[in-house]
Image: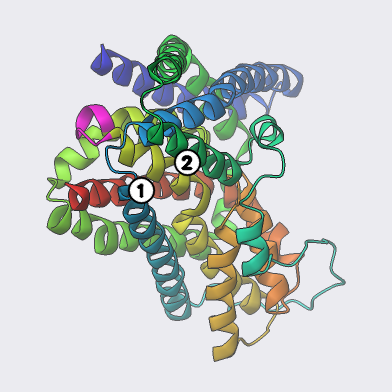
Amino acid sequence: MQQNLTKSIFFGFFFGIIAGILTGYISNFYENLSSSIVNIFDFGGSVFLKVLKMLVVPIVFFSLVSGVANLNNIASLGRIGVKTLSLYIFTTILAITISLSVGNILDPGSAVSVVSEEKILNINSPPSIGSVFLNIIPENPFKSLVEGDMLQIIFFAILFGGCMASIKQNKVLLDIVFKLNDLVLKMLEVLMKIAPLGIFCLIAKTFSSQGIDSILELLKYFIGVVIVLLIHLFIVYLPLVKLIAKVNIINFFSGLKQALLFAFSTSSSSATIPITLNNLEKSFNVKKKVSSFTVPLGATINMDGTAIMQGMATIFIANFYGIELIFTDFLTIILTAALASIGTAGVPGVGMIMLGMVLNQVGLPLEGIAIVMGVDRLLDMLRTSLNVAGDATVTLLINKLEK
């Protein structure tokens, strides 16, 4: 059944591309008809995403609570947390460092020089380290659950599950939580039946509105980001998967194909959490106590693909406006991007807000965001796939180390 679902998702993805291109072509002759078709795609895709995101919070909460409550030794949670955070922060810093290095070699945007106008965007500075960690603690856990604040939900779920683990004689409460976890996973299984249609609509809408001209104008920047995404995948992730996690590379991609395809289609690592959890547990026998902690946390703080985009975009915008970056600027970019990724929602388009934080810190014109926004939708799909691959890589590493 899982293979049939994967095939259906692929066909939805493939025919979505064709439908999107045809819709874009129709717009040259029948603009009203094309607009109506795009509205249908938009509605279908929005329904699918809303239903999927509806399940994200309950799946994360109950899977994490049940995973922590199942711990035989609650002290092992501390080991998992330290290892996971260390790996996520390390790979994020490495990602943006590689991006800045390759960006300096390719030098995108150097062929033009535009005088900057007054800043047209107003984006807040990135939060301080203290406030980031302080904001992890929810004042009202129910409000956090309603608003989908993932870091606060994770904190509360760990505390809740940890306390449950210490009073295991209360079997009734444990059984209720485990049954609720099974219930939300069953709801996900039902949702998966409409997944191919939802992905068809999302992809069709994207390719009907994304013009090829805007991609050609930013080809050097676009190719630069893609190159660094591939470098990070093949030089950082895959060696870790092969050498430390001891997982065959072909099996790695085969076992995660559903999650990667979902990530590419939805541009949302948060929306892909249920699929990633399912793939890791079924394809790689990852312990639930590991995956239920590392995957939701990774969807919240592991933004390697976004960090790569920020590094390349910063260099492109600086060159575009004829502004020279110095060594301290590069250090600021690395630190700001790593900090800004913590607590940022894994949803489509959030990378642009994070980019604004980085530009603001090094004094670059914020209107430069509008320049790269034309191709960001396609890049967002690619970097979200990398983010999900990173979540899976760290999960496999932690699972291997814990065994």
Image label count: 2
Q: Which residue does the image show at 44% across and 9% down from the upper left?
A: 190
Q: Which residue does the image show at 58% across and 79% down from the upper left?
A: 110
Observer-nearest of 58 and 170: 170
Circle 1 crowding by C-alpha within 10 Å: few under 14, some 14–19, many from 20: some
Mark seen at residue 280: none
Mark seen at residue 77: 1
| Residue 305 higher or lower than 207, as above or below | below
Q: What's drawn in magenta, residue-wise?
A: 281-287
Mark 2 belongs to which amino acid?
Ile
Mark 1 belongs to which amino acid?
Leu
Q: Which residue does the image show at 69% across and 34% down from the upper left?
A: 147
| Residue 140 higher or lower than 387, as above or below | above
- The secondary element bearing badge 1 is classed as helix
Residue designated by label 2: 158
In the rendering, at what x and y percent does residue 108 appear?
53, 72
Q: N-terminal of the two: label 1 or label 2? A: 1
| Residue 359 higher or lower than 327, as above or below | above
The reply to whether the C-beta atoms of the residues labelled 1 and 2 are less than 8 Å apart is yes
297 falls in the magenta region: no
Q: Which residue does the image show at 43% across and 74% down from the upper left?
A: 97
Type of colouring: rainbow
Q: Is residue 261 visible?
A: no
